[in-house]
Amino acid sequence: PRTAAVIPAAGRGVRLGPGAPKALRALSGTPMLIHAVRAMANSRAVSLVVVVAPPDGAAEVKNLLAEHALPERTDFLVVPGGETRQESVRLGLDALPDDITAVLVHDAARPLVPVDTVDAVVEAVRDGAPAVVPAMPLTDTVKEVEPREKDEPEPVVATPERARLRAVQTPQGFDRATLVRAHETITAKGEGATDCAGMVERLGVQVVVVPGHEEAFKVTRPLDLVLAEAVLARRRA
Ligand code: C5P
């Protein structure tokens, strides 16, 4: 079976503050996207990496991939993205060659995921699971609320049992046909799919969780950049 990794990297990264698209911001001197591409390509199971670039940034991303050292046994493709993460992923899937049977979808915003986590997801898919997500237990207690306008107190609706909750990460792994079917079935915008596995769940297909890793956190806010730099410094030490 041939496995490809699709990396949606077309987001603006508004929550990170003003500047370049999030995926192109530097971590320890190297764009976050390059870290994410290496994290996928370092898995021997991944033979192709498809980067979904900002719609006006495909040429820039191609240049970046050419400038940085990447594993030679891996193929790379760059395609322009869309307005939502879901659309960007679909555009990445459309670019896959026919012989790809398994697909990882990995956020450019999770540049530091360890290769062991990537391998564990691929292995679970190859063992027959149609959809696999790496996830971590929560440290915070979570409340469901009735959302209100900014700063207004929000009424609590429920407190789900923490021990049964998981925070999901990427790469999420799929049997290709299952993920394509999810995208064909659930096409309406604004349905609010924040991850691919959620779309597969709506098909009624069983999704399973494997252990995630604390270094697979998503770089979203400025503090996350501080943490990412610290993780890289620790790896170099
Ligand atoms: O915004 P969020 O952090 O959830 O984005 C997750 C991933 O989806 C990021 O890697 C981002 O670049 C990507 N994305 C995309 N196309 C969009 C919006 C987000 O590829 N239109």
Image (tube, rainbow, N blue to C red):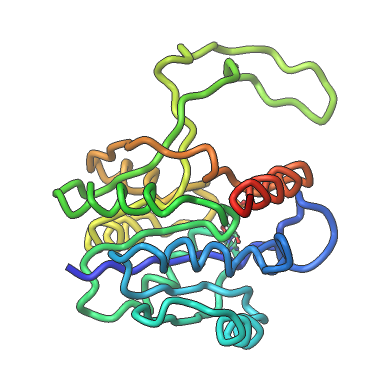
The residue under the point 52% across, 72% down is 52
Please count the marks in the image. Answer: 0
28 up-or-down from 226: above or below? below
Give coordinates of residue 16: x percent, y percent: 77, 51
Q: Quadrant of ligand 1?
A: bottom right
Give coordinates of residue 97: x percent, y percent: 28, 81
Q: Quadrant of residue 56?
A: bottom right
5 up-or-down from 48: above or below? above
The residue under the point 69% across, 13% down is 155
41 up-or-down from 202: above or below? below
Furthest-front residue in view?
237
Give coordinates of residue 216: x percent, y percent: 52, 45
Quarter of the picture containing the N terminus is bottom left
Q: Quadrant of residue 83?
A: bottom right
91 up-or-down from 103: above or below? below
Most foreground residue, 68 or 152: 68
Give coordinates of residue 213: x percent, y percent: 47, 39
Asked whether, in this view, residue 210 is left or right of residue 145, the answer is: left
Asked whether, in this view, residue 236 is left or right of residue 148, the answer is: left
Most foreground residue, 211 or 20: 211
Q: Quadrant of residue 85?
A: bottom right
The residue under the point 31% across, 41% down is 201
The residue under the point 66% across, 84% down is 60
